[in-house]
Image (cartoon, helix red, strand yellow):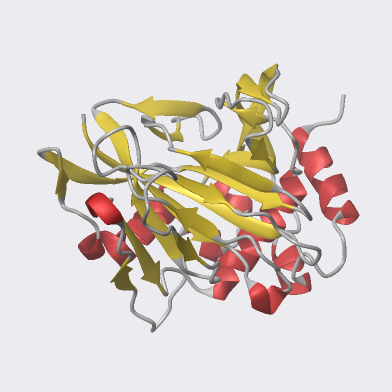
Amino acid sequence: MQSPAAAARDNADAACEGLVSPDAREALEGVKVRIAAQITGSLPDGRSVPGVPVFSVAEETLPQELRFGAATAEAATRRDVALVDDGLAFVVDGAFPARVADLLVALTEAMGYEPAAPGIQTPPGMRMNKSVHFLVPDAFSQWLFGRMQHLLPQQLDGCKLLGFSSRLDCYKYDDGDRFRMHTDGQWPGYGIGKDGVSMIEWPGAISKISLLLYLNDESDGVRGGATRLYSTRGVGHTSRPVDVQPAKGSILCFRHGYGEDSVLHEGLGVRKGAPKYVARINALYER
């Protein structure tokens, strides 16, 4: 059986030219990918699949930008999205530099996007994309949190903001792919265990905000693929939804779960052109 590292190399070699930055591919030569966990997931047609992997990477084989973050002079800024019923949604521009986005695309293409998504159960036809989930180094998630901590709600439901999970859920949308209307569920925080490989759950933390990292945009050939946000009253309300266009290096943040200010949303279809790459990470609060 082929090792995860060997499979990653083969997938990287098979990645289409133009999808992955040559510089990013070169920076990831020698990366060591391991399986951190295998959990039940689901396919776009709704069927359950056992043993879907969540990956981790040997930190010492990663480029510095994915271990500790990247230096950038650009400050992150927040712009709120106005929704009926005060659903909580905002965009953080300049959250991370293009170099980090390119490296994440290259790394996830090396891991290999598959139809199955671990730990997720969706009805047939709701999630029409491919996914790969992995654990970033804790230092990386702490760097990203540090860049935008001051822009996030410091408390929600009386619970204190703690940080970001280190589990990154990445999705690739090809021509015609979309994610139909849904509300994101709550998750515990995850990180890498003391063995440097396995996935562990952090006690005392629960997610309350989804952060959707846009890893490419129209300048990379993406056509379509906006994230459409609805009021908490849903599509039957007379208000118009708000479309947020992918912008490389920005993060769309919105309340998830099933509270009054949680946000219904969908990923609109991608048209013929380059695939759209996004990644979800969760903001954690006291449980």
Query: In the drawing, does residue 226 fall left or right of residue 15?
Result: left
Q: Residue furthest front?
A: 238
Whether residue 223 is situated above or below residue 8 in the rendered picture: below
Q: Nearer the viewer, residue 258 or 31?
A: 258
Q: Residue furthest left?
A: 158
Residue 100 quadrant: bottom right
Query: Could you say where residue 280 lies in the image, as x and y percent from the top left?
Result: 49, 48
Is 56 on the left or on the right of 92, as rendered?
Answer: right
Image x and y of residue 136, in percent: 51, 47
Q: Residue at x 50, y 56 (%)?
A: 228
Where's residue 194, x and y in %?
Answer: 44, 30
Residue for point 34% across, 49% down? 231
Q: Which image quarter is the N terminus in?
A: top right
**Side (left or right) of 10 relative to 232:** right
- Residue under the point 19% across and 54% down: 153
Q: Is residue 15 visible?
A: yes
Q: Quadrant of residue 28?
A: bottom right
In percent of width and height, residue 35 lies at: 65, 30
Please state, as top left, top right, bottom left or bottom right, where the C terminus lies in the image: top left
Q: Quadrant of residue 122?
A: top right
Count of marks overlaid on the render? 0
- Residue 88 visible in the shown view: no
**Residue most toward the bottom?**
73
Residue depicted at 41% across the width and 32% down the height: 185
Seen in the picture, residue 250 relative to 278 is either above or below; the reply is below
